[in-house]
Amino acid sequence: MDQSPTDSASRRCRARNAIDVETINPWILAQDPETRNPLAAEHARITGAVDTFSIPIDFDERFAGFAPLPVRPARPAGKELVKGTLAYWRFDGQGSAGTSLTAGQTIRDLSGKGNDLTVVTVPGSAADALTWSADHHPDQPGHASLKFAGGRNPVNGSYLTTGPKAPLNAETFRGGYTIETFVMMPLDWDGGRNGNASILSRRGSAGAAGKHGKNTDPNEPVAQFAITNNGREAQFNHYPLNDTFPTTNWSHGMPELRWWHLAVVNDGRYTKLYVDGAPVVDNPNRASIGFTTLGLPWLMGGHEYAGAIDVVFHGNVGDTRIVNRALAHSEFLTAK
């Protein structure tokens, strides 16, 4: 394709590190020169010192702040195993992008604590319900993710679960915790089909755990880190050890096709949700100590209601880590 005169002029200015200014009258220039009167001919191009001039500029320096940030190189898993890491799941180097994971396939817990994940597929789901993906957050240590293609009505998709004897199942986190994950919703994400699907959740209903009181749903899981149907907000809802009703943290709405880093941090007393390192406005100021557990598995991408899977996540999930203490920003998976 031929360059337009404007493109060509722009390239010349960039090469010379200068901006050229010229004052013209397009309406007059569009006329046949033979038909212009003397005044029109004089004002077709104005060449006075304040009308035609050049301004020196260093384009690279001036627009450096707008240059795209380079993607950080992948970091070894071992560097992300901070003190207290109980589980660390990442998805690089395990499968070719676009290929499917199959029921029974295992993803190792890189913490070495034995909290491996196993793929479970809802009967009747498509073969590509869960696939490997090369897409990832630019600050994510592992350069890969899992792409979930799940939903509800009817329930479909594949999710992952810890084993029945995984140590994480019994953990109560009395001294605090940090849960981190990376997530991206696709453009076809729909609140009716995909809302309230969990990125991470803990099996066992609130009712079975003896929970009751305000805002309590006896059929919901005792802990869930989900994307709600009200504008794609991150929600962390859990039943602490010190209360009979839940503590809930909410984020702002998160647009599709953008990677987000989510972190829930509990210092042994208060729980805060962070989005891309910033605390959300809706962090409740009430004590919530530890996690209630019935000793049942954790799920990635699956959400249980009344004892059965009712929706599977739709979107990409990247590196996910669970630590048994509150982490500072400098220890997050996004830390420099």
Image (cartoon, grey):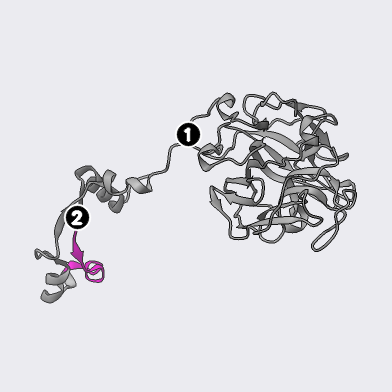
Residue 77 % position (x, y)? 59, 26
Disc 2 packing (10 Å; few <14; some 14–19; many ≥20) = some
Between 40 and 45, the residue placed more toward the observer is: 45
Q: Is residue 36 magenta?
A: no
Q: Could you tell me which residue is drawn at 20 percent across and 66 percent down?
A: 24
SS state under label 2: strand
Q: Nearer the viewer, mark 2 or mark 1?
A: 1
Between 191 and 330, the residue placed more toward the observer is: 330
Q: Could you tell me which residue is drawn at 64 percent across and 39 percent down?
A: 325
Q: Is residue 29 magenta?
A: yes
Between 230 and 243, the residue placed more toward the observer is: 243
Please report contact status of discs 2 and 1: CB closer than 8 Å, yes or no: no
Disc 1 packing (10 Å; few <14; some 14–19; many ≥20) = few
Q: Amino acid at mark 2?
A: Asp
Q: Quadrant of residue 291?
A: top right
Q: Which residues are magenta?
A: 20-33
Residue 118 % position (x, y)? 79, 30
Q: Which residue is mark 2?
A: 20
User: Tag 1 or tag 2, which sits nearer the N-term?
Assistant: 2
When the figure is inspected, residue 160 is found, relative to residue 110, above or below; the finding is below
Residue 139 % position (x, y)? 52, 38
Q: Amino acid at mark 1?
A: Arg
* Residue 66 visible, this angle: yes
Q: Could you tell me which residue is drawn at 78 percent across and 54 percent down?
A: 243
SS state under label 1: loop
Q: Is residue 133 left or right of residue 79?
A: right
Q: Which residue is mark 1?
A: 72
